[in-house]
Image (cartoon, helix red, strand yellow):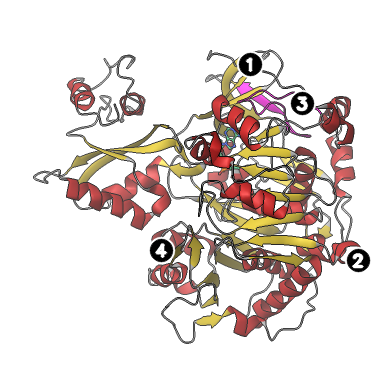
Amino acid sequence: MSEQHHDVYPVRDDIAANAWADKAEYAAMYQRSIDDPEGFWAEQAKRLDWIKAPTKIKNTSFDRDNVDIRWFEDGELNVAANCLDRHLEIRGGDTAIIWEGDDPAESCHITYAELYDRTNQLANALKEMGIGKGDTVTLYMPMIPEAAVAMLACARIGAVHSVIFGGFSPDAIAQRVIGAQSKLVITADESVRGGKHVPLKDNVDAALTREGTEVCEEVLVVKRTGGDIDWHEGRDVWYHEMVDKQAMACPAEAMNAEDPLFILYTSGSTGAPKGLKHTTGGYLTYAAMTHQYVFDYHEGDVYWCTADVGWVTGHSYIVYGPLANGATTLMFEGVPTYPTHGRMGEIVDKHKVNILYTAPTAIRAFMAHGDSVMDSSSRDSLRLLGTVGEPINPEAWEWFYRVMGKKRCPIVDTWWQTENGGIMIAPLPGATPLKPGSATKPFFGVQPAIMDSEGQQLEGEAEGNLVILDSWPGQARSIWGDHARFVSTYFSTYDGVYFTGDGCRRDADGDYWITGRVDDVLNISGHRMGTAEIESAMVAHAAVAEAAVVGYPHDIKGQGIYIYVTLGDDVEPTDELKKELTQQVRKEIGPIASPDIIQWAPSLPKTRSGKIMRRILRKIAANECDGLGDTSTLADPSVVDELIEHRVNR
Ligand code: WTA
């Protein structure tokens, strides 16, 4: 068992006194949520406005022969109405979104009333363009208010959005447009990040030349920069021309609680990315409740989640959770280190941010510049810090606590996944003592357990694979168009439980420590990448015979991408070719999948049955060549010596 970290930060009295849950309340509510999930969640559902209140609360089965997940199944509601309409009377004039541009000179405040108007106008525009309930709409957008407006407008009319992160390539866009069968793509001319323009519209144009994308008939284009773009008459429509003329009222469609709200693609260990299907009532209840309790959100707080809306964190904790709670949510267009490395702190000061939710990779990037990196701001408005996306190393945790939060702010390390819809394991600021590196305790209704490789559930202090024993309302219901894959990915490793794909340790206090993926999924700067996807991008290059991708420890990114490449006969291994292969991955997947290291491998270590021994490749990539373990089952053990000799990371 790995070494334990012993620092414990007790709950602060001033935080506990005002928190939604102190230690005793957390314990009592958690117990109730497990003993009586129906009663517990029936009560929690009341935090939303229902058109028809649900009478059936939980109807879920994790049985691999019949995986079927329904929450509030006879209820009806509309997500946009819950995020907008119901706030108008009490806080129509309050700020819903603070938008901070890439350029520090650009920012604006959008009130709930304005967001309501803009959402309705776009909703009416979508209807005019022939989009209705059940249609899918793909969003490939910058971090601008229109991204949130587009999500809410889809929700308002019952269309299903599929947001694609702006760092993905045309091929990746095409794959997702086809997967979701989207009739419409909403994008912008360009996005602006770190002073650079990214050609979003060009990427969409390129994507829509790919076979199978004919399903997409229209492209709605926000003018963000006014940069040069091609125009496809009859297909492309300017957002402002279409939207500005629309009426500001649009009735909210009554949706069943189990109608889909969105699809979100994420990487798995095998095959193409999966479109997780999230539904309406359970998702919003869970996103809103976790946002309130984990961030101890109180009326009037300014809350900032630094994620991109292209990831699930942006869905649940920039848009849906905070807006359902009537919060002020900050949306930042740029990157945290531009124009200065202290930008994050400067934004906190500028907008008096109270709650800051970010990623370990950003923290490590600051750390690399020393404590003085935050000298340009006071950050006195901060009350609470949060992290998500990957395990946080205790050093980064301590730095975040000491420098960013000036030893005043608890840190909530939140473990969860695209599949989960919302935070699953995290401290509650008024209830849970903090341990750097541990996500600590399960949220209400979440029953984590640890399994060994034989499927035995381990009790007490233990290390193994993390599973969840029963359903929670925010859970994804299926993989879009492929329920069998949903079942085989999450419910067939162990019978009757949800398999997370993460390894985990539970300590003597019952606190959970996530140790990282146990499958072939990489976590690069908190972004999920499947090794199989990167490998298939590599072998698509004519020079490549075979490729094996593994992760290795990287100071800033957490994990870096290390690729072993076997070239075809007679192909010269040159630096030029390495550049070409890097370009190849960027083209097929996007810049976020750029390889960090490529090593030429005359051959790969394989078992006699032809299976690549990734365990060995991981060790060599990590420069841990002494503990390679048993190599006797290899077809040709000498392959390993050759790889060690030419390893690149040393
Ligand atoms: C990892 C992001 C440790 C984990 C919301 C998970 C974490 C994957 C944490 C999901 C954390 C996320 N501590 N590991 N606090 N948060 N992970 O789907 O491996 O993009 O399975 O969802 O990120 O990534 P995803």
Q: Few, some or many C-alpha atoms within 10 Å of disc 1 (few <14, some 14-19, many ≥20)?
A: some
In front: mark 3 or mark 1?
Answer: 3
Marks 4 and 1, how far apart in space?
45 Å
Marks 2 and 3, how far apart in space?
36 Å
Stretch in magenta: 431-450
Instruction: Quickly name the residue at label 4.
Output: 170
Give the dominant element type of the magenta stretch: helix, strand or loop: loop
Instruction: Quickly name the residue at label 3.
Output: 432
Residue at the outermost left position: 570
Viewer-closest of 453 and 575 = 575
Marks 3 and 1, how far apart in space?
23 Å
Give the image quarter of residue 621: top left
Q: Are marks 3 and 1 in contact (CB under 8 Å)?
A: no
Above or below, comparing residue 139 to residue 560 in the picture: below
* 38 left or right of 236 in image: right
Residue 440 in magenta stretch: yes
Residue 431 appearing in the image: yes
Count of labels in the image:
4
Q: Residue at x 33, y 50 (%)?
A: 537
Circle nearer the N terminus (2, 1): 2
Q: Amino acid at mark 3?
A: Thr
Q: Are marks 2 and 4 in contact (CB under 8 Å)?
A: no
Q: Amino acid at mark 1?
A: Leu
* 238 left or right of 7 in image: left
Q: Are marks 2 and 3 in contact (CB under 8 Å)?
A: no
Viewer-closest of 559 and 455 = 559
Residue 89 marker: 2
Instruction: Quickly name the residue at label 1.
Output: 458
